Image: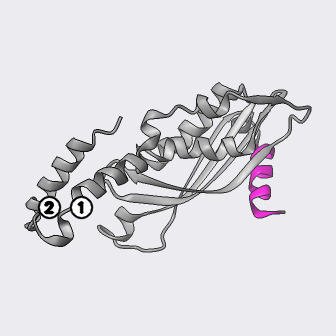
Amino acid sequence: MVNKDKIKEAVTLLLEGIGEDIHREGLKDTPDRIARMYEEIFAGMDEKSKEHLSKTFRAGNNEIVLEKDITFYSMCEHHLMPFYGKAHVAYIPDGRVVGLSKLARTVEVYARRLQIQEQMGAQIADALMEELGAKGAMVMIEAEHMCMTMRGIKKPGSKTVTIVTRGIFAEDEKLQNSFYHMLQGT
C-alpha cells in the first residue's frame, strides 16, 4: 500500500536537496501531486495476477492464444525512471481459456510496480503457467528505457527486447517460430 505522507515528505526533501524553494508557487502542491501519481503508477503493488486470471472458460482450442501489442508503462527499480513499450503474451491452453482483456490486465499488474524488464516478462509467463494451468507460455517485451535515453548513454529510440518461454514453448522451436510469425502477421 502506498503511503502518501511518506512520499510527500520524500519529495519535499528531494526538492530541497536539488536546491529548490519548496514554497515557490509552482512547487507548492508538487509533493501532493507526486504522491497521488505514485499511487496510480504503483497500483500493481497491491494486486495479484490471480485476481484477473481466475475466471476461465472451457474451450476446445488448445492452440496458441496471442495478445500482441499490449502497451505498458513501468518504472525501473534501479533509477526510478520510466520504461515503456509493448508486451506480446501467448499461451497454450489446457482446455480452458481466459478473457483476452485479462492478459492485458496481467501485464498491468506487473508493470505497475518497481520493476526490471527481464523480471516482468518472467512474472507474466509464470502467472499464465500457474494460474491458467497453461501447457506453455511465451512473453516478448519491447521497451524504451528512459535511464538509457535521457541519462547515461543517452541513446533515444533504442529498444530492449526480452523473451521468456515456459512449458512446451521452451521445448518446441516450431511453436516459438509460430509465435514470431503471428507477431509479424504472416
Q: In percent of the image, x 21 and y 49: which residue is there?
A: 8
Q: Is residue 24 left or right of residue 113?
A: left
Q: Are marks 2 and 1 in contact (CB under 8 Å)?
A: yes
**Residue that numbered label 2 is attached to:** 15
| Residue 15 horizontal/vertical position (percent) | 14, 61
Q: Quadrant of residue 61?
A: top right
Q: Answer whether residue 57 is magenta in the image.
A: no
Quadrant containing the C terminus in the rendered view: bottom right
Q: Is residue 54 left or right of residue 172?
A: left
Residue range of the region highlighted in magenta in the rendering: 173-185
Q: As shown in the figure, which amino acid type bears the numbered disc 2?
A: Leu
Q: What secondary structure is the magenta-colored segment mainly?
A: helix
State the CA–CA distance, disc 2 to disc 1.
9 Å
Quadrant containing the N terminus in the rendered view: top left
Q: Nearer the viewer, residue 147 or 80?
A: 80
Q: In percent of the image, x 61 and y 44: which residue is there?
A: 105
